Image: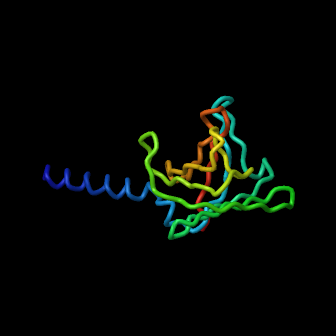
Amino acid sequence: MKKLVTVLFVLSSLVYSCSNSIDPLQVETWRLASTFAYMTGTEASAEELGIDEQIYFEEGGRFIKSRERDNETNSVEGVWQEMSRNGQNGLLVNYPENSPLVFNCFGSPEEFYFVREGILIQDGATPCDGPEYRYLAVD
């Protein structure tokens, strides 16, 4: 009986951990839900910011980010690759040049995305007190 309980516990843990993680490549579209500023502890929804931003990770490495704000749409394309940064597995997106849609502290045309608790995170601006960008999967 003890073995059966142990086996059931292990199986249920595996099911839970697998269902709790999302592969960013298995989701066709991600939409910006909010930003979070760690310095002030404040979160702002994309709606409050007046932003409609979507990102796409396509097979073959193509990445597209599109943002609509004030009835103006801008987009930028890059190339993603799987990578680990600071112990976090995710996707590094490299762009051919910098763009106002590329957010990081280093002035380089790249962004790093990873999934935490079902939310796709881009936190390239947090080291310089900028916000973390949080995206949700679009059905």
Asked whether 93 or 40 is in front, the reply is: 93
Asked whether 103 or 45 is in front, the reply is: 103
Task: Indicate whether 70 appears above or below 107.
Answer: below
* Residue 20 in picture, x, y percent from top left: 44, 54
Asked whether 99 or 126 is in front, the reply is: 99
Residue at 72% from the left image edge and 43% from the top image edge? 44
Q: From the image, which quarter does the C terminus lie in?
A: bottom right
Q: Quadrant of residue 40?
A: top right
Asked whether 74 or 137 is in front, the reply is: 74
Q: Residue furthest top?
A: 39
Residue at 44% from the left image edge and 45% from the top image edge? 88
Q: Quadrant of residue 67?
A: bottom right
* Residue 93 in picture, x, y percent from top left: 56, 55
Residue at 31% from the left image edge and 55% from the top image edge? 12
Residue at 66% from the left image edge and 42% from the top image edge? 107
* Residue 116 in picture, x, y percent from top left: 50, 48
Relative to 18, is 7 on the left or the right?
left
Relative to 134, is 13 on the left or the right?
left
* Residue 113 in picture, x, y percent from top left: 54, 51
